[in-house]
Image: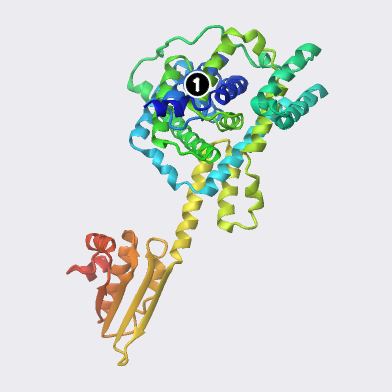
């Protein structure tokens, strides 16, 4: 117990505290921006980020991952907020949390094993592009001071780690934010700051039960939004957890993360916040800045609330150029540049899956669509590839009356046609043997193909013997097959 507590919370205190400070500063403009996207007051996003970060620090399944209000979730709320208002959004957030908890208990987090590496790579690259594109409004139609500050920020981020001793002790993004803020205040630069994005809250969040009638009509209104939020939130969280797993070379509990995200969203809804999920950008900032344990996530949430409530006068003066520099660093570090170099070496199907995932996510700004397209394409390519691993050869005896077919490989929906075409049903043999000792039948489509071959051979007057089925194949053939039933030919002819 004590060993686990130390490992999950206090094994990297200095790194976690400093990285938590960086993440907290980076969360503020993001939370405000996502609130504006959703059409709600900035405090809704800030309260949500605080609640979600603190709860997932304790209950999440991936130490070091940052969860808060996100753009992907905000986009799904726009219509609900516009047509029904904030109170219905809070109800949708509560229901979203319940659905995510249910997903955790149903162990749906385990479905991540069906997401191929090419889909994950495409997801990462798409998010890197979206993070960079999100910074462009801050760099459009501005004075040269903004470009100079952004360039200086990137210089600090990439050069400060090379400073002896100190460069390894303090995260360079934190140095960037503090240095550029000091310069902007000292020179009195007229550039966009955090305070220009929206009003910061001046009180801590309080318990707030949604003021809506608890009726089936309310449920009918919010359920479609809640289901969409739950799916997108879990997808983004599971994908981000997989990326953090790779960055830290440590495992995570995906099903626990589903439950943790659910409880966090319920807490956010009860304290006036919007639904959220894991954030790849802030998670990468946390890991790159030295954060590793649950303490870094807790520090990020707590410091965020302290900054916006008690130190808002200082936070308002942080230049957006400093945060833009940090987020550009995140987009550069997040993008898998190796995937571009590997385009020549990797199979065409792998490249198509990766590029399609990137294209759909960037075009729709919906992570769920991109992952869905990528998974479907990967499944189709896999089925097509496995379908080719089927070889059927035959031998005719010396008298020309008995032929033995030897089937080797996988028989399922993608290879069923190839299976049936391999047999010469008009040969007019006395006996036929189908040796399935090195084959495997996977589904009812493959069973139907076997029925078709056997019954048509018999209809042509041949005696057919099927042998060698392994136990799993024999089970599905016995259950769904018809070729050994008395009325087999009638069934085939549709009588």
Provide the secondary structure element on which disc 1 rests.
Answer: helix
Q: Nearer the viewer, residue 469 or 464?
A: 469
- Residue at 74 percent of width and 27 percent of height: 156
Q: Where is residue 186 in the image (x, y as percent from the top left)?
A: 78, 12
Question: In this rendering, is residue 193 above or below 386?
Answer: above
Q: Please give left or right for residue 494 compared with residue 231 in the image.
A: left
Residue that appears at 51% across and 46% down:
373
Please report the residue visible at 39 percent of the width from the left and 14 percent of the height from the top. 212
**Residue sitting at the far bottom:** 399
Instruction: Locate residue 453, reporting x and y percent.
Output: 31, 72
Q: Which colour scheme is used?
A: rainbow
Q: Residue furthest right?
A: 144
**Image position of 46 with respect to 407: above or below:** above
The reply to whether residue 41 is in sight is: no
Residue sitting nearer the eye, 443 or 334: 334
Residue at numbered disc 1? 298
Name the residue at the left extreme: 486
């Amino acid at each position: 117990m004590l060993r686990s507590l130390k490992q999950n919370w206090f094994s990297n205190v200095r790194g976690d505290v400093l990285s938590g400070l960086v993440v907290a500063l980076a969360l503020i403009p993001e939370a405000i921006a996502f609130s504006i996207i959703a059409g709600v007051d900035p405090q809704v996003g800030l309260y949500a980020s605080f609640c979600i970060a603190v709860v997932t620090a304790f209950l999440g399944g991936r130490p070091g991952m940052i969860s808060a209000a996100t753009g992907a979730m905000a986009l799904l709320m726009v219509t609900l907020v516009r047509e029904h208002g904030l109170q219905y959004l809070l109800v949708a957030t509560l229901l979203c949390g319940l659905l995510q908890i249910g997903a955790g208990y149903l162990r749906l987090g385990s479905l991540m094993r069906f997401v191929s590496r090419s889909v994950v790579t495409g997801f990462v690259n798409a998010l890197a592009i979206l993070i960079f594109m999100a910074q462009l409004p801050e760099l459009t139609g501005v004075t040269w001071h903004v470009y100079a500050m952004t360039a200086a920020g990137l210089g600090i981020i990439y050069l400060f780690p090379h400073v002896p001793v100190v460069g390894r002790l303090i995260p360079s993004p934190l140095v960037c934010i503090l240095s550029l803020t000091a310069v902007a205040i000292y020179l009195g630069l007229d550039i966009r700051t955090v305070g220009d994005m929206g009003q910061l809250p001046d009180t801590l969040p309080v318990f707030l039960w949604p003021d809506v009638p608890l009726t089936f009509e309310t449920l009918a209104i919010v359920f479609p939004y809640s289901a969409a939020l739950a799916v997108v939130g879990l997808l983004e969280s599971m994908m981000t957890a997989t990326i953090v797993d790779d960055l830290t070379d440590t495992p995570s509990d995906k099903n626990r993360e589903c439950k943790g995200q659910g409880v966090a969203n319920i807490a956010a809804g009860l304290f006036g916040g919007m639904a959220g999920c894991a954030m790849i950008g802030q998670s990468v900032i946390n890991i790159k800045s030295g954060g590793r344990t649950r303490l870094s996530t807790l520090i990020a949430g707590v410091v965020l609330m302290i900054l916006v409530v008690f130190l808002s006068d200082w936070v308002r003066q942080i230049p957006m150029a400093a945060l833009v520099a940090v987020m550009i660093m995140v987009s550069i570090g997040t993008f898998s540049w190796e995937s571009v170099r590997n385009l020549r070496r990797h199979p065409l199907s792998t490249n198509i899956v990766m590029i399609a995932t990137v294209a759909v996510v960037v075009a729709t700004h919906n992570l769920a669509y991109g992952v869905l397209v990528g998974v479907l394409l990967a499944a189709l390519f896999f089925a097509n590839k496995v379908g080719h691993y089927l070889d059927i050869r035959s031998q005719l005896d010396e008298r020309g009356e008995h032929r033995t077919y030897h089937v080797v490989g996988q028989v399922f929906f993608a290879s069923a046609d190839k299976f049936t075409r391999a047999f010469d049903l008009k040969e007019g043999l006395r006996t036929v043997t189908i040796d399935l000792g090195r084959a495997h039948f996977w589904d009812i489509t493959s069973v139907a193909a076997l029925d078709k071959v056997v019954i048509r051979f018999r209809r042509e007057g041949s005696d057919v013997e099927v042998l060698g089925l392994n136990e799993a194949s024999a089970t599905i053939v016995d259950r769904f097959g018809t070729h050994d039933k008395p009325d087999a030919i009638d069934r085939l002819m549709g009588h």
